[in-house]
Image (tube, helix red, strand yellow):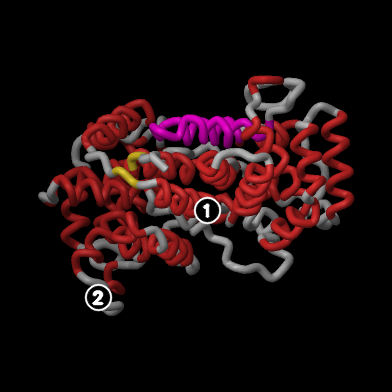
Amino acid sequence: MHIAIDLGQAIHALSDALDLVGVDEVFHGKRVGFMATQCGRALGLSELALEELFHAALLHDCGVSSTYVHRRLINELDWEDAERHCIKGGELLDRFPPLAHLAPIIRYHHTHWDALDALGVPESIARLSNLIYLADRVDALARPHYERDLLLARHTIREMVERLSGSYFAPELATLFLQVSENEAFWLSLEPRHLIRFIYERERECRPIPISFPELRQLALLFAQVVDAKSPYTMEHSLGVAQLARFLAEQAGLSGETCAKIEVAGLLHDLGKLQVPDEILEKHGALTPEERAMIQRHSFETYQILRGIAGLEDITLWAAYHHETPDGRGYPFHCRGTDLTIEMRIIAVADVFEALAQQRPYRKPLPPDEILDMLRVFVRDHRLDGAVVELAGRHLQEIWQIALAVSPIKPKPDLAPA
């Protein structure tokens, strides 16, 4: 398949997705990237080393899907289980060869400096991990003061860095940070409108890193694992949608290339759901209008995340339109009729089928016949495509087995894409 994308653009997209876990606080990874890069430049790192440091900073929280965990990370300087997300993030990146070299940096980015040596971490890794840790904790300390009194609060923050030198942070890095952050411009650059310009300029400076379609599938699986880890009720939902969508596309006679691309779209369709607070996803009762509005943001966020990756234009639309309906009453764009391609309609049916086959806080998983009955009701209400639903009906037991294979309530094989 002749699709190649830029890994750098994909890293920025994943960073955008990870930042959504903060709900209203969506610049954490980017601020850490700015601060780490400024310090790295003062250290005299090469351009290649700076690029890798920047990418590691953008992805440092790839092990965080839960808003509860994110709140603790930005509201508390240190806590007992903080390292858990580092281990998870390191394992995720280690399974994707083009980013595996960043895995050790991510693995130790919450380990205190005075513990790194005893763990036998190589000095080159220890220094970069600790630099990201320093920037990460500075951002947590600064968070209450953004767009209010940051210039006044910077003195207290810098004093805290100095006090933690030698324990939390390498003395050399703490001293370097105090030098770099002495001027007001450093702190003002952390404001969103200035930070966005820095990110844009940094993205332009980074060299293109093309990856192949098989690598894209692997990266999409990584994205999906981050999303699906958000709640035990959605565990492996994206993987299930991807498998079901591909199967239905094959049965519909679509080309091999289209079937492969629709699988990737299925893996990526719920990226925007990282912004939905845990308590909404796991709520047992009916959603309030405000909570439903939060849910309805997610497919637009998926669109915004993916549209920055050149070469993924059709996959982006297929993924983002999975809540559009034939009658135009879906969201977020209110597309209808012929605006909805067969790929979009297939993903929409796969999404509903997989959701109904999974357990939710408010109901048990449904058996296949009940799922098909509900899908047909959705067709009568003009919420799903009738031809795709009938295609699913003709292969009901097969798609039910696919849904069971990735359901968290059943033993499951490893269904990672080849």
Q: Secondary structure at mark 2?
A: loop
Query: What x and y, as percent, mark residue 87?
Result: 43, 66
Of tags 1 and 2, the one toward the viewer is 1
- Number of other residues with Cα within 10 Å of mark 2, as a class: few under 14, some 14 to 19, many 20 or more: few
Picture residue at 62% right of the left edge, 31% below the top? 321
| Residue receiving disc 2 | 117
Residue 199, position as x, y percentages in the image? 31, 34
Crowd tier of the residue under label 1, counting other residues whose Cα lies within 10 Å: few below 14, some 14–19, many 20 or above:
many
Residue 290 forms part of the magenta stretch? no
Q: Nearer the viewer, residue 370 or 100?
A: 370
Give the residues drawn in magenta, as a range. Answer: 299-323
> Eyeballing the image, is 398 above or below 115?
above
Q: Is residue 305 magenta?
A: yes
Quarter residue 10 falls in: top left
x, y percentage for residue 178? 20, 49
Which mark sits nearer the N-terminus, 1 or 2? Answer: 2
**Where is 121 relative to 341, above or below?**
below
Q: In the image, what residue type sits under mark 2? A: Asp
In the image, residue 10 sits, relative to residue 106, either above or below, namely above
Q: In this orientation, does residue 79 appear? A: no
User: Residue at the location (27% across, 52% down)?
Assistant: 159
Mark-to-mark CA distance, 1 and 2: 30 Å
Residue under label 1: 226
The residue drawn where x is 68% and y is 49% is: 279
- x, y percent for residue 254: 60, 38
Left/right of residue 178 with respect to residue 107 in the rendered view: left
- Look at the numbered disc 1 and give the secondary structure of its residue: helix
Specify the principal SS of the magenta part: helix
Q: Quadrant of the N terminus?
A: top left
